[in-house]
Image: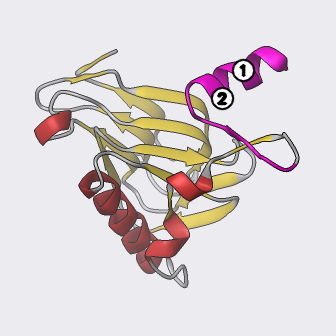
Amino acid sequence: SKRKNYLMAKYKLLAQDATTGQLKYPESQWLNVKDFGTFTSPTTTLTAFNNAITAGLAAGGQTVYIPSGTYEIDDVLIVPGGVTLVGDGEDKTIIYSQANARILNLVEGSGAYVTLGPKIRNLQVKGSKTAGTNQIGIAADDDLYMAFTDVSNVRVVTCGGHGVYIGNTFS
């Protein structure tokens, strides 16, 4: 809708293509996770995500863009405050795990991002019903607290334990 496009452009989630006039993700301004490693196994995929998140924090809290595709990881992906993960949509960008553990663990940021939570947008977190009861799709919890944690247009499916767990988070 026009309102949705306006809001997305206003908050810089989308940019207008100079040639076509269509709104699109401003990939040139974001870090693309595919530039930070190989995706040949769940372990190398997790490493690429960790590398992109580290680079995003080092660049002053830049957004990490995750193109369409299914990304299988084999351990917890820790997403600190100051990081924004953005995919192409709930049915297009999928972070998948079979591990009996948290899939995305949202934690408080540090330095300039202390007390802030991360932002997760436009993707799917997919678990495995056979993973075990410790599998949680998204956990937002920290020993102290997090403010302004934002999870929007995210679908969590087929987790062995809980889909979403929210602990000490304030938004």
Residue shown at 12% from the left, 31% from the top = 143
User: Camera-side residue: 106 or 75?
Assistant: 106
Residue shown at 17% from the left, 27% from the top = 115
Label 2 crowding class (10 Å Cα cut-off): few <14, some 14-19, many 20+? Answer: some
161 is within the stretch colored magenta: no
- For the N terminus, the quadrant is top right
Question: Residue 53, percent across and down?
Answer: 35, 57
Residue 77 in view in this figure? yes
Q: Could you say which disc has been placed on residue 46 in the image?
A: none
Which residue matches tag 2? 9
Q: Secondary structure at mark 1?
A: helix
Disc 1 to disc 2: CB gap under 8 Å: yes
Q: Quadrant of residue 110?
A: top left
In the displayed structure image, the side of residue 106 where residue 153 appears, left or right: right
In the displayed structure image, the side of residue 84 where residue 58 appears, left or right: left
Q: Secondary structure at mark 2?
A: helix
Which residue matches tag 1? 6
Please provide the residue range marked out in magenta: 1-19
Kind of residue at badge 1: Tyr
Label 1 crowding class (10 Å Cα cut-off): few <14, some 14-19, many 20+? Answer: few
15 is within the stretch colored magenta: yes
